[in-house]
Amino acid sequence: MADTSARILRLLSLLEARVEWRGAELAERLEVSARTLRRDVDTLRELGYPVNAVMGAGGGYRLGAGGRLPALVLDDDQAIAIALALQTAPATVSGIDDAVARALTTLRQVMPARLRAASEAFEVTSLRNYWEFSAAPVDVVTLRTVGAAIRTARVLSFDYRDPGGAVPDPGQPGFRPPREVEPHHLVVWAGRWYLIARDHRERTWHTYRVDRILPRTSGGGAVFTPQQLAREDLTRLVVQNPDRGDTPGQWQCVGSAVLDLPAAVAARWAPGGSVVEPVDARRSRLTIGGWSWAGIAGLFVTFDTDLSHVEPPELRAAMDRISQRLRAPAG
């Protein structure tokens, strides 16, 4: 009986992991006959799970919508992981604080006492570390709209805010018509959310900051065929891409300098809240914000390369002061 229960739980897990399964493939995964598989499917249906038969060559199964929530089976590490993930999510997504509290309460109500105690042992409060240069949390409504377009493989139409957060009207400087893109992937890097998408008409790949996206409609556009993106593609399109939609952080001090490094290299190591612009094949301009000119100067020093065209004068003066301080102990 224990083996049967474990097998049925595994069957449910497989059905939840994929939209549709061929019957023969499921039977092979479970190492049972087609007849036993049919009995297990009937058992799930009796328990309230809407397992639908798929007609066609070979036949198959899919898990329908509206099934009852299965019993929550978690080990200690999973319970802790869920509690930590829920409590740290508001650091990058806004508008979900109440939902996080309700989700934690709901989950803990169906947890066994031991696991409930394990999850409650981690009550987390997030405080800002100014070295993180983190962005403001992304609006959950925007994130939900973008995520839905990715999941349903539908073209997404949106306005893209300028670096100051505005959307210029027609006739104003900087106006651009709404983007029409095929959304493929969401990436979180350096505390920022990025959308990887392909232009629906030009078929070129682009990277957009999600906090600058203003969806035109919550509905979906035309259906498209998604392309597979490897982890290397995501790294190239976000981490190594200077044209990823970044804007200078809102700091009291903002400075820039030309680095003797290619833009892709500078972008790879630039802190969050900075902007990298190519100058030529081997040089790039980096703009960084910070709480002091000395702090910005220190960040430029970490690139360990020649600097030129340093702006503004306050940043040049800070670099001179740091240079003098370092000469004393060196001498």
Image: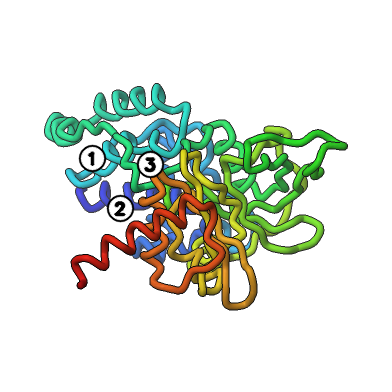
Residue 40 screen position, x and y as percent: 38, 48
Residue at 78%, 44% (x, y): give it: 174
Residue 249 screen position, x and y as percent: 50, 43
Residue identifier under label 2: 7
Viewer-closest of 141 and 126: 126
Residue 24 screen position, x and y as percent: 48, 64
Residue neighbourhood size for the residue with mark 3, other residues' Cα within 10 Å, grouped as few (<14), some (14–19), many (≥20): some
Residue neighbourhood size for the residue with mark 2, other residues' Cα within 10 Å, grouped as few (<14), some (14–19), many (≥20): some
User: Which mark is nearer the camera, 1 or 3?
Assistant: 1
Q: Secondary structure at mark 3?
A: helix
Residue 133 screen position, x and y as percent: 41, 46
- Quarter holding residue 83: top left
The answer to whether residue 230 is visible is no
Please, is residue 324 above or below residue 124 in the view?
below
Q: Secondary structure at mark 2?
A: helix
Residue at 17%, 43% (x, y): give it: 76
Residue identifier under label 3: 43
Tell me the CA gap for discs 1 and 2. Answer: 23 Å
Taking the image as shown, residue 44 lies to the left or right of residue 220, namely left
